[in-house]
Image (cartoon, helix red, strand yellow):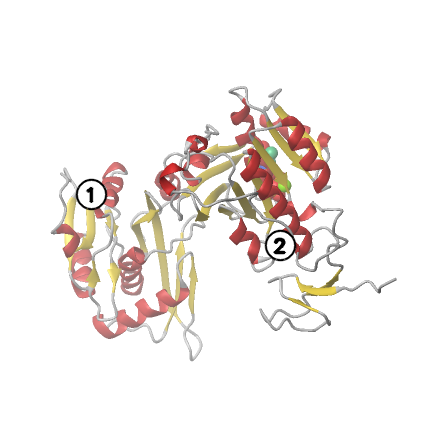
Amino acid sequence: MGKTRTIYSCQSCGYQCLKWLGKCPECGEWNSLVEEVPARGTNSPGTRRPLLGESFPQPLTEISMDREERLFSGIGEFDRVLGGGIVPGSIVLIGGDPGIGKSTLLLQAFERLTESGRTALYISGEESARQTKMRAERLGISSRNLLVQTETSLETIMASINEVKPCAVAIDSIQTIFSTELESAPGTISQVRESSSKLMCLAKSMGPSVFLIGHVTKEGAIAGPRVLEHMVDTVLYFEGDRGHPYRILRSVKNRFGSTNEIGVFEMKDSGLAEIVSPSELFLAERPLNVPGSVVAACMEGSRPLLVELQVLACHTNFGTPRRTSLGVDYNRVTLLIAVLEKKAGLNFFDQDVFVNVAGGVRVEEPAVDLAVIVAAASSLRNRPVDPGIVAFGEVGLAGEVRAVSQAEMRIKEASKMGFSTCLMPQNNINRISIDCGDMKLVGVNSIEDALEAYEGVD
Ligand code: TYD
Ligand code: MG
């Protein structure tokens, strides 16, 4: 009888080798190699069978589209983040910190889905059926078409799906599922990869949409191989601050819609509630007439979002001043401070600078630059900015203020939220074609203009 051959797989990137190593040569992770027994007959689970069934070349024009009818969960924010509803046969990965509300979100979405008489299957590998029921009670869910099963064996789950033929399946979570074909423990890279690829074949051939809940690692990435993110159609992250009740559902990959779309929810006693006007929420506790606070008009996917940007510049006690940034890219902040020093002559060399986006939101687009500049100057000079001002615009290294996309939507949102003035790039103003009503547009070409303008406005 031959000796059982084992391989060592890196739990972080999927690299495989025959000997144990302390450090993965592929991704550089320490102590991430785990001994695994490869599946019988092969040492590479992915190469055993065609992933998407039998295939043949055919003209693009003749491929039928009839399966492209999307399903709507009825939770507007959830549907929008998915790109306008759930695509049948798609596979969606939802990641997020423990306790953020992933199970709650899917349970609520599934209940709405089943209201129209469709069947949905919720597989829980972490909680017993009773625990899921208790949660459902709390959420006021009482749908007869929502089936719950506590199971971790992939083969049993596949059998259930074949029997029930649901329109959507939730796997909570993919790290608890194991296939008996592999001898590795649940949660290891080969198990996660095997379970996901089998579920993917099933989704593509039979048509249920599969939602996989994935745990995240300490570093914030979805645990398991990166291949998991490549394999699925859509990757959503459910994030939020433990101290705040609101949660943001963010799409980072979507084969059926735009990425960077966000959905905003509030966690209440009775579950997650949609927030239709997030700007209102993020500006709710804004202090007025305080130095260092400026409202920025950002875009999150297709939606404008007004956020309050706060900067605190205070005298440093050390030789090297500190720069701290929450919600805005740290490098961007140091760059903007340098531009302010060089181009506007403001001295930050003896100032610690703290930047924060109120409410725990993260903004990633450069359009927030102008607001950072104005807020930093306002804090340094200890002069508040008029609370009726909204700022947006990208700032370059020469101190120039550059045009940004979708200026009109930003202006409309600011006007809807009751602001009176937009401090914005002059180049954007030249191209505006909408009627801005009472909104005063102040165009600026450089940061000097911007600092002068904000002083002039208040
Ligand atoms: P859960 O969906 O179990 O999180 P995850 O699946 O991401 O681990 O959510 C758990 C948290 O949500 C828990 O801390 C309690 C809170 N919660 C509410 O505030 N209201 C509710 O109605 C529910 C069901 C949960
Ligand atoms: Mg859960």
Residue positioned most to the left: 430
Residue 428 x %, y %:
17, 52
Report which quarter residue 206 is drawn in: top right
Q: Amino acid at mark 1?
A: Ser
- Measuring 51% from the left and 41% from the top, which residue is drawn there? 245
Q: How many marks?
A: 2
Q: Between 356 and 224, which is closer to the camera in this rendering?
A: 224
Report which quarter residue 154 is drawn in: top right
Q: Which mark is residue 46?
A: 2
Marks 2 and 1, the one that precedes in the sequence = 2
In three-dimensional space, the C-alpha distance between marks 2 and 1, rounded to whole angstroms, equals 58 Å
Q: Between 392 and 227, which is closer to the camera in this rendering?
A: 227
Q: Label 1 neighbourhood size at 10 Å, few (<14), some (14-19), many (20+)?
A: some
Can you identify the residue that label 1 sits on?
420
- Measuring 54% from the left and 45% from the top, which residue is drawn there? 93
Image height of 197 relative to 320, above or below: above
40 with respect to 349 (left or right): right
Residue 62 x %, y %:
38, 37
- Measuring 56% from the left and 57% from the top, which residue is drawn there? 226
| Whether the residue under disc 1 has CB within 8 Å of ligand 1 | no
